[in-house]
Amino acid sequence: MTTVIPLPAPVLLLVAHSDQTFPVRRVYCVGRNYAAHAIEMGHDPNREPPFFFQKNPDNLQQTAEFPYPPLSTDVHHEVELVVALKQGGDTIDAVDALDCVYGYAVGIDFTRRDLQAEAKAAGKPWTAAKAFEHSAPVSPIVPAQAIGHPMDGNIWLKVNGEAKQQGDLNQMIWKVPEIIAELSKLFTLAAGDVIMTGTPSGVGPVSRGDVVSCGIDGVATLTVAVV
Ligand code: MN
């Protein structure tokens, strides 16, 4: 059987030290998962149930450039640990959840903060603030087989060499196994799903011409130029 339109291109992420790629199915993101970031955004840092939003698979990009999006004048960087799943399911127990993880990467959840603020004020969805073109640069995926499952480690982001975000993975309010467990109550997870796990404090704006570098110790680094 043929298709009535050309098949959309699959989204394939590079895997570190490999000529194989990781095909993406869905992208989930966790909101407010570091207390200091919740506070800087004006929210209660106490442990509330996690909440989720999505980006589009093809928002993930592995190029050296981040094109500044239209219709915003306040685009913020959010450096995040990215989790890539090799299997999924429903109602996954947290103690089994790491069995689902293929590997990890560092990524940036670029956010149109002005559109997000308007959406929050109006009780509208965040889609335009979060799921725009090129909004999720991500490093090559590093297999858990090579690095294990990072539970702590420095997570940082610099703009033009100046430190902006700084945290530790051990400051995550909801840890990776808990995030997978919670997501799997709401959605059927599957191989190819990617989870962005929230950002530490220090988010701020970027401008065309900036060079944004970020990393997670023991996982990966990533550099993108804002164009
Ligand atoms: Mn985020």
Image (spheres, rainbow, N blue to C red):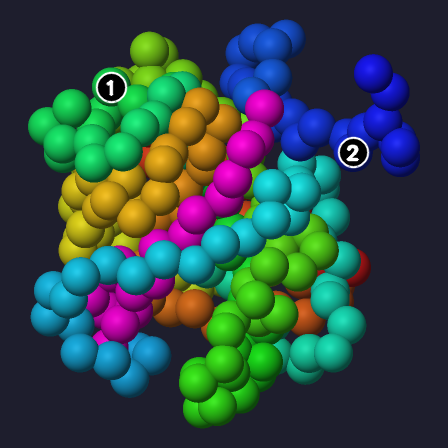
The residue that disc 1 covers is: 99
Mark 1 vs mark 2, CA separation in Å: 30 Å
For this view, does 97 lie left or right of residue 146? left
Question: In the image, which residues are magenta?
Answer: 23-39
Q: Residue 46, image x and y in percent? A: 11, 70
Name the foreground residue: 39 vs 187. Answer: 187
Q: Earlier in the sequence, mark 1 or mark 2?
A: 2
Name the foreground residue: 193 vs 38. Answer: 193
Q: Is residue 78 above or below residue 60?
A: below
Q: Quadrant of residue 180?
A: top left
Name the foreground residue: 5 vs 57. Answer: 5
At a point 44% along the width and 85% down the height, the residue shown is: 123
Q: Is residue 129 above or below residue 79?
A: below
At a point 17% along the width and 55% down the height, the residue shown is: 173
Residue 25 forms part of the magenta stretch: yes
The residue that disc 2 covers is: 8
The amino acid type found where label 1 is placed reads Asp
At a point 36% along the width and 57% down the height, the residue shown is: 52
Helix, strand, or loop for circle 1?
helix
Q: Residue 188, image x and y in percent? A: 36, 36
Count the marks: 2
At a point 44% along the width and 23% down the height, the residue shown is: 191
Q: Residue 57, image x and y in percent? A: 60, 42
Instruction: Please tell me how crowded label 1 is: few (under 14), some (14-19), or many (20+) other residues with Cα within 10 Å.
Output: some
